[in-house]
Image (cartoon, rainbow, N blue to C red):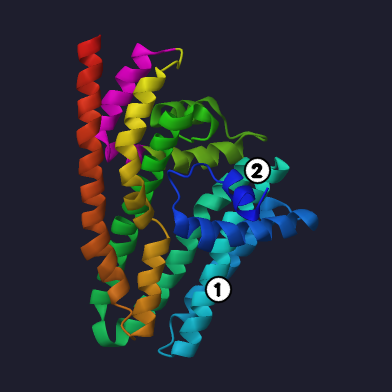
Amino acid sequence: MSLKQQVMATMKSEDTEGPFELYVTRTPGYLWALLFKQLHVHPIAVTLISIVIGAASGYFFYFDDLRMNLIGMALLVWANWYDCADGQLARMTNQRTLVGRLLDGLAGDIWFYSIYQAIVLRLQPQMGIWIWLICAYAGFVCHARQAALADYYKNIHLWFAFGNQRSELDTYERENARYQSLGWRRGEWFEKLYLFFYRSYTKGQEDQTPRFQAYYRDLRRAYPDGNIPPSLRQEFRQKSRPLMPLANILTFDLRVGVLFLSMFVGLPILFPLFEIAVLEPVRFYTRRRHETFCTEFHNQLRTNR
């Protein structure tokens, strides 16, 4: 196979990742994964390295010095390549673990916490308490729900397209049941701790998508064996596919592009304002479109029953 074919084989779906992700993110990540495989490096080690590199990038955004900022940009891109490589490596070597999944989920949060902290400290002398309030809202409210919704919509799309094979479409009900079934005794405490946080993350995703939840609930009742008609899956996939570029906008690439631009022009405040003024309307628009066609599918399901 060509390099492109090899990289595409490690991607969950062409529907959820465009040309930019393929060439700028996934291909370098795949090459790193090949190297780590030859060196017998565990995927968790790659994830830990990405966390350290990404968190360190924030330090260089503190300075009002483009040369220092460029170092931060390079480190963040490097960390993102490793963040791609760990998942590709885990699939190559069949070394998927709960610890790895937990750390992979935390990686981006740690990176951006470091970056926001740097921006706050850099601008505090000029803006005082306002920069704390702006960045807190942009990071803990806007960024958090944008990324969670984008991740959820991708997993919904993958579930309809491929079923459970490529999707991680979890539910709060199921994750909470798992949490309640575990104790804090030896051998179970780590998974229980992970589920303590993960069930809340899942609940937040479900709270943003009430119309999909109603449809998904009745769909599982109508097809308890999971054998959803291929035609229905295909119809949903066709409706969902145009929203995948918007979901990508709400994740890493465009957000980081604006961060880098704000550093080039010497106006770091543009980054949190972009989260609030641009990405929030994109989230709202994406959510409205998705909820609208979920209502249409739900009505169709109830009519057919």
Q: Amino acid at mark 1?
A: Leu
* Residue position marked by numbered label 1 in the rendering: 75
Task: Please say whether residue 221 is one of the residues in the magenta stretch.
Answer: yes
x, y percentage for residue 170? Answer: 44, 32
Q: Could you tell me how far apart the alpha carbons at marks 1 and 2 are, in whole angstroms?
A: 25 Å
Magenta residue span: 203-224
* Residue position marked by numbered label 2 in the rendering: 91
x, y percentage for residue 125? Answer: 30, 87
Tell me if I can see residue 47 in this picture: no
x, y percentage for residue 253? Answer: 42, 62
Q: Nearer the viewer, residue 60 or 263?
A: 263
Where 256 falls versus 203 (above or below)? below
x, y percentage for residue 31? Answer: 66, 59
**Residue sitting farthest toward the top:** 305
**Residue sitting farthest toward the front:** 2
Mark drawn on residue 115 = none
Image quarter where the C terminus lies is: top left
Q: Amino acid at mark 2?
A: Arg
Tell me if I can see residue 203 in this picture: yes
Task: Please say whether residue 281 is one of the residues in the magenta stretch.
Answer: no
Horizontal side, residue 181 vs residue 222: left or right: right
> Crowding near pointer 1: few (<14 within 10 Å), some, many (20+)?
many
Q: Nearer the viewer, residue 234 or 132?
A: 234
